[in-house]
Amino acid sequence: MTGRRSAAPADAAKRAVATAAAGLVADGMVVGLGSGSTAELMVAALGERVRDGLRLAGAVPTSERTAAAARARGIPLTTLDAHPVVDLTLDGADEVAAGTLDLIKGLGGALLREKIVAAASRLLVVMVDESKLVDRLGRRTPVPVEAVPFAWPVVAAALQRLGARAVRRRVGADGTPFVTDEGNAIADADFGAIADPGRLERDIRLVTGVIDCGLFVGRTGLLLVGGADGVRRVTPA
């Protein structure tokens, strides 16, 4: 019962922030659809708006799971080939640095597509509940690093030299290596509290075999935070 009581406010906050984010979408927009539990609630809310008459130019999903959810809700999908500029992307985060709005993303394994769509967007809107706010990234969450599977030993050694305790993500009782939608591996790299996320992001991306990492530095245009007092909007300083 204790777990249910504690989960209920967080669930309500996620639903409120997802609904608020979906409300930002206007007719004719190309919308990026993020991945994760809050993004799934946003897709549901956006689907309701589409059923009520909202007309989108199309939505670009950041994962196969999000694509399936959008189709089920009647949201028209498109691609970056058809629309290389995205008006608005709505996505969640695993950690948000309260002072800078820098992010850690990718615990769901979709960081590469999430970062590509964010880079193509005029505005990245990030949806979180208050539990995701931290004073410094990395205190609670490892940095997911997407890498070519063949390069795993090289990537693991390089991440350790950068100061991380890195483990390859595995799933299931048999410990099967996790595979992304693009067929890549994920390393969860625990750096502890990160003093300079921008520098660390650059250093990780320079490692041979790394495709990208879950540090999103300087990308957030608007943060929506759900809490007991409703949804508040935060913009970069």
Image (cartoon, rainbow, N blue to C red):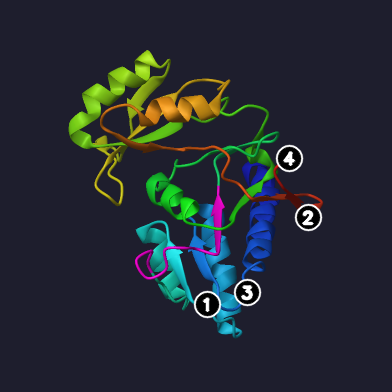
Contact? badges 2 and 1 (CB < 8 Å):
no
Residues rendered magenta in the picture:
79-92
Secondary structure, mark 1, is loop
Q: Residues within 10 Å of mark 2 (few under 14, many from 20)?
A: few
State the predominant SS element of the stretch in magenta. loop
Q: Which residue is drawn at 62% across and 70% down?
A: 25
Q: How far apart are marks 2 and 1 (CA)?
A: 27 Å
Q: Where is residue 226 in the image (x, y as percent from the top left)?
A: 71, 51
Does the magenta-highlighted stretch encompass residue 85? yes
Does the magenta-highlighted stretch encompass residue 81? yes
Q: Distance between the residues labelled 4 and 3?
A: 26 Å
| Residue matched to label 4 | 237
Q: Position of residue 146 (x, y in %)?
A: 34, 37
Name the residue furthest left.
150
Q: Residue at x 34, y 25 (%)?
A: 167
Q: Distance between the residues labelled 3 and 2?
A: 22 Å
Report the mark closest to the observer, 2 or 1.
Answer: 1
Q: Position of residue 168 (x, y in %)?
A: 31, 30
Q: What residue type is labelled 2?
A: Gly
Q: Distance between the residues labelled 1 and 3?
A: 8 Å
Q: Earlier in the sequence, mark 4 or mark 1?
A: 1
| Residue matched to label 3 | 26
Contact? badges 4 and 3 (CB < 8 Å):
no
Residue 35 in view, yes or no: no
Residue situated in front as seen by the camera: 13 or 115: 115
Q: How crowded is mark 3: few (under 14 residues within 10 Å), some or many (20 or more)?
A: some
Left of 234 or right of it: where is 29?
A: left
Left of 102 or right of it: where is 162?
A: left
Secondary structure, mark 3, is loop
Label placed on residue 230: 2
